[in-house]
Structure formats: structure tokens, C-alpha cells
Image (cartoon, helix red, strand yellow):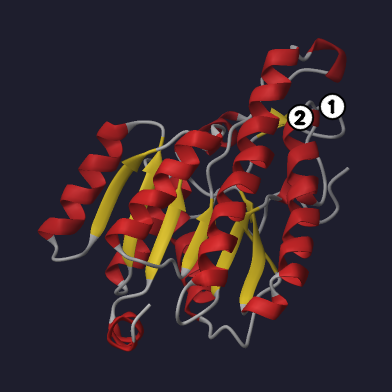
Amino acid sequence: MTQASAEAAQTQKKVALVTGAGSGIGRATARKLLANGYSVVLAGRRQAPLDALANEAQEQGNDALAVACDVTDAASVASLFDVIRLRYGRLDVLFNNAGRNAPPVEIDQIELDDWRCVVDTNLTGVFLCTRAAFAMMKAQTPRGGRIINNGSISAHAPRPFSSAYTATKHAITGLTKSVSLDGRPYDIVCGQIDIGNAATEMAERMARGVAQANGTIAVEPLMDVEYVADAVLHMANLPLAANVQFMTIMASKMPFVGRG
């Protein structure tokens, strides 16, 4: 990179990539980053909701780029990062948000295909995006960047009938620690946000009642997803000399502390 391009990189907007940006936590976080001066790459499997969000951002004078991507596919992730490199020349923040769940059944009832879909999205997808972001952040000028992983309350304590999801979220904690350690020589920091009961499409079932550890079904409180977006923004805005290694944000009265 030339001196002129290095100086330009220092003055341009910070660039963030949000996976799973078409709905829920990803969409709310992308909007929050856009409103706070970031250029945001919107990634997800479905192009239409990404385009709608990008158009909304552009109407508000913000810079958004919609890129359809399957995070479980290495070629698709590589193509996504090629687009980022060509458009912006750098990446400052990656929010690994894309995720999915399996049907809520006991472990002996989980279909292997369902298990693999959850692992491929929640763990391998995070690995593929992190690997690509790490390589870009290590090589760019100025060097470094921030990777934020969407963990879960399930990274600490499982719900009943959630072995696939819980296994991947526990694994994300280990990956977060490993990347945080390996990134130190390159000014790459990695943290994890563990979210409990944000009011999104994925959490609608909480309001209808979900299985509890004592065998009952209970309605659980939800919190506004905007609080999650605010928390991610706080993590993203920190200088690289500081890092939120782990944050838990949850509906205050959800059954987590004391679960079981």
C-alpha cells in the first residue's frame, strides 16, 4: 500500500462486516453501526432482505453493501472477502452473527443432517469468516482489527433439548479465546457477546412458553434488540488497546442465573 493510500485508509470510515444481517440481531446491529458512521457490509443467505437494508441505508446517506453469502461454504466466504477487499481495501470489525438452531429434541432424536447444519453454520461458518478476516487485518495498513463473536447464554448453561446449539456455542468461547491470543502480535482483538432473550424472530417462541430445566413450560421475558446493538457498538468502538473479552447481555428476569 502506498503512503497516500495508507493516509486515505486512516481517514475513511471504519468498515464493518455483519453476517446474518438480513434479520434479527444482525439487522439491528448493522443499522446501529451505519447510524454511527461505519461502512457496513451486509452478508446473509438471502439477497432480498440485504438489498432492502442497503437501500434503506443509502436513502439515509449511509454506506452499505449487500453481499449474499453462505458462511458454511468456503468459496462463498472467499468471494465475500474479495468483494470487501476490492470495495474498501480493509476491514475493521467483523461481527460473526449468523447462526441457526436444530429442532428441540433429545440428543438421540437429532438427525445427523440437523446436527451438521448447526455445526456448519454456528462454528465452521465463524471459523471461515474469522480466518479470512484475520488474514486481511494482519496484512492491511493500518494493521489490526476487531472480531466480535455472537455467543449465547447457551455458551454458559444449556436449555433442555439444545445439544447441537449448546455444543457450538461452547466451542465459540474456545475459538474466541484462541483468536484473541493469536491476534496479539497483529493488533487483532477478539471478544464475545453472550445474548439472552433479545426480542427477534428467532426468540418469538420465548413469549409463547419454552421448556425449563424442571420440566415445566414457562413464558420468558424478552428485551429490546436495540440494547444488543448498543452493546455491539460499544465493543466495536473501543480502541484496539482495549477489549471486551466477554459480555453477557440479557433480559433481566430471564431464567439464567439459577437456571436448573
Q: Answer left or right for 38 relative to 167.
A: left
Q: Secondary structure at mark 1?
A: loop
Q: Nearer the viewer, residue 3 or 39?
A: 3
- Label 1 Cα neighbours within 10 Å, binned few <14 / some 14-19 / many ≥20: few
Q: Is residue 222 above or below residue 212?
A: below
In the displayed structure image, the side of residue 204 where residue 111 appears, left or right? right
Kind of residue at disc 2: Ala
* Front position in the image: 53 or 221: 53
The residue most toward the left is 59
Residue nearest the observer in this picture, 134 or 107: 134
Give the mark nearest the N terminus, 2 or 1. Answer: 2
Name the residue located 69 percent from the left edge and 14 percent from the top edge.
113
Instruction: Tell me residue 196's x, y (percent).
Output: 64, 51
Q: CA distance from mark 2 to mark 1?
A: 20 Å
Task: Mark 2 vs mark 1: give the one in front.
Answer: 2
Viewport quadrant of the C terminus: top right
The amino acid on which the numbered mark 1 sits, given as a three-letter code, is Gly
Label 2: state its secondary structure.
Answer: helix
Res. 215 mark: 1
* Residue located 64% across and 42% down the image: 220
Q: Residue at x 66, y 29 (%)?
A: 118
Q: Which residue is mark 2?
A: 164
